[in-house]
Image: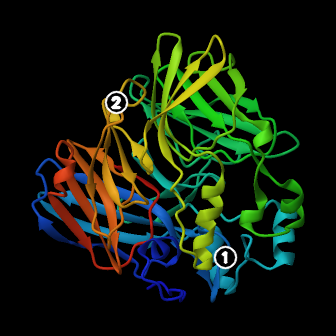
């Protein structure tokens, strides 16, 4: 059982999802199925997000500092079992043993200074999960992959896969054409470096290239075509002075500097040393949907924000504020001309959206549909090339998470007060609503990303 921190009473489900702890930990147990699960649905849906938003009666300064919790749902023969566990990372175990916060911006100032001098952080493993070579890893962008047991979500330790320099992003992207998973990690120092990695289906992980950046930034996601890896480096700067002196909290360390513009970095997979890079107008994105090559141009679909306000709005949830943290996100298509070094971006749909995904087999090549959540996680649907949206509007007492396409169906872990469910949609009839629901009898905080294995 996880001890929950009391939060101010509120009818707002969004606030609960960003600030209320996972209320029960358990291994795989039978779950109630409403409707009929498709016979073809066999495997495990893994979801990851912050499951604990504070300890010892105090809150963390930002939801992104929360300790990760993986929820897994197994489907087989029309039945389902589920497990939810907070990942007992090395740092969290150390804090529990000491009965006090040791890491993060909510720890005492003297402890934060000591951590900085020793280069110690807590890997919260709280953002995503990935399967590579039949191994399950929980990811966060500030640390190494945390390996978990696919059988019971047991903690197996941090891994460097023989190649990772420091951090490993929470957003690896698989390219079917090369049968390789690509990812990156930032290394901070006198010069901030972008390390780019390739993890093939068979063989060892390797580093493709290390690219110096203009300054210490935050980079959450990137995208891959069959020929290029593309990074939009927004004009974000981490305040090194504040970080070294531990002044302020997590929100204060991240600053928006629009005068720097957004740098576009394109890495050719076949020749990663021949990087194409240029700067365009300032904008921000959390997530990409997909990208593909069209002639000498790259076509990139993503959710675009005008500024970094969304980051600080998410931080407001720990203060009990009623936020519209994702309201500025709009679905865009960018055309990158590699010869001219230009980016032209067009908004395809005028509706709030986030957590875009595509059919797995279409990654890196031209795709027919993008699946996403809409309107502050209040709807699930698809966007076609013309920007037409087809969606299922959830009741006001429910919220959705990132939808994943599996064998002709769309899966999304959804939330109500004090319980959750996996909604299973026919991907060709999303507007009709779920054909089945798998119920979890306790509160599950918002999960950011996941995978189906």
Dot 1 falls on a residue whose secondary structure is helix
- Closest to the observer: 330 or 100? 330
- Closest to the observer: 200 or 280? 280
The answer, for residue 288, to whether it is visible in the render is yes
- Closest to the observer: 73 or 298? 298
Identity of the residue drawn at 81% across and 35% down: 214
Identity of the residue drawn at 62% across and 44% down: 284
Closer mark to the observer between disc 2 and disc 1: 2
Q: Position of residue 188 (x, y in %)?
A: 79, 46
Q: Which labelled disc corresponds to residue 241?
A: none
Q: Which residue is mark 1?
A: 94
The answer, for residue 164, to whether it is visible in the render is no
Q: Position of residue 147 (x, y in %)?
A: 51, 56
Q: Position of residue 166 (x, y in %)?
A: 70, 47
Question: Gap between marks 2 and 1, in whole Å?
Answer: 52 Å
Q: Is residue 51 left or right of residue 245?
A: left
Q: Quadrant of residue 75?
A: bottom left
Q: Which residue is mark 2?
A: 386
Colour basis: rainbow
In the picture shown, does residue 316 fall above or below 326?
Answer: below
In the picture shown, does residue 44 fall above or below 361?
Answer: below
In the picture shown, does residue 172 fall above or below 105?
Answer: above
Dot 2 falls on a residue whose secondary structure is loop
Q: Which badge, 2 or 1, is on the more N-terminal residue?
A: 1
Identity of the residue drawn at 74% across and 71% down: 105
- Closest to the observer: 43 or 341? 341
């Amino acid at each position: 059982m996880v001890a929950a921190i009391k939060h101010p009473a509120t009818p707002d489900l969004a606030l609960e999802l960003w600030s209320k702890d996972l209320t029960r930990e358990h291994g795989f147990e039978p779950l109630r199925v409403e409707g009929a699960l498709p016979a073809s649905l066999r495997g495990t849906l893994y979801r990851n997000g912050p499951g604990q938003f504070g300890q010892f009666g105090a809150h963390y300064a930002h939801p992104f500092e929360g300790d990760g919790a993986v929820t897994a749902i197994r489907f087989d023969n029309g039945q389902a079992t589920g497990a939810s566990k907070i990942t007992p990372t090395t740092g969290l175990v150390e804090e529990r043993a000491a009965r006090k916060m040791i890491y993060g911006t909510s720890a005492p100032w003297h402890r934060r200074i000591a951590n900085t001098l020793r280069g110690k952080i807590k890997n919260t493993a709280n953002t995503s999960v990935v399967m590579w070579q039949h191994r399950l890893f929980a990811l966060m962008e500030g640390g190494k992959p945390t390996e978990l047991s696919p059988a019971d979500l047991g903690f197996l330790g941090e891994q460097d896969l023989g190649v990772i320099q420091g951090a490993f992003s929470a957003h690896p992207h698989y390219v079917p054409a090369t049968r390789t998973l690509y990812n990156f990690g930032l290394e901070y120092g006198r010069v901030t470096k972008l390390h780019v990695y390739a993890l093939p289906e068979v063989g060892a992980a390797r580093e493709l290239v290390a690219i110096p950046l203009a300054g210490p930034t935050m980079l959450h996601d990137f995208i891959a075509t069959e020929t290029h890896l593309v990074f939009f480096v927004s004009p974000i700067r981490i305040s090194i002075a504040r970080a070294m002196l531990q002044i302020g909290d997590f929100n204060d360390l991240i600053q928006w500097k629009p005068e720097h513009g957004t740098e576009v970095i394109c890495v050719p997979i076949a020749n990663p040393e021949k990087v194409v890079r240029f700067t365009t107008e300032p904008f921000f994105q959390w997530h990409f949907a997909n990208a593909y090559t069209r002639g000498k141009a790259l076509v990139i679909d993503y959710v675009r924000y005008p500024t970094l306000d969304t980051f600080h709005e998410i931080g407001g949830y720990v203060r009990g504020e009623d936020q519209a943290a994702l309201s500025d996100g709009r679905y865009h298509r960018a055309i990158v001309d590699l010869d001219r070094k230009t980016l032209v971006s067009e908004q395809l749909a005028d509706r709030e959206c986030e957590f875009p995904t595509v059919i797995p087999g279409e990654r890196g090549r031209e795709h027919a549909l993008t699946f996403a959540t809409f309107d502050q996680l209040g709807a699930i649907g698809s966007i076609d090339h013309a920007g037409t949206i087809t969606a299922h509007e959830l009741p006001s007492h429910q919220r959705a998470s990132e939808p994943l396409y599996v064998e002709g169906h769309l899966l999304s872990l959804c939330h109500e007060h004090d319980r959750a469910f996996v909604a299973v949609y026919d991907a060709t009839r999303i507007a009709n609503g779920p054909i089945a629901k798998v119920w979890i009898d306790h509160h599950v905080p918002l999960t950011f990303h996941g995978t189906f294995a």
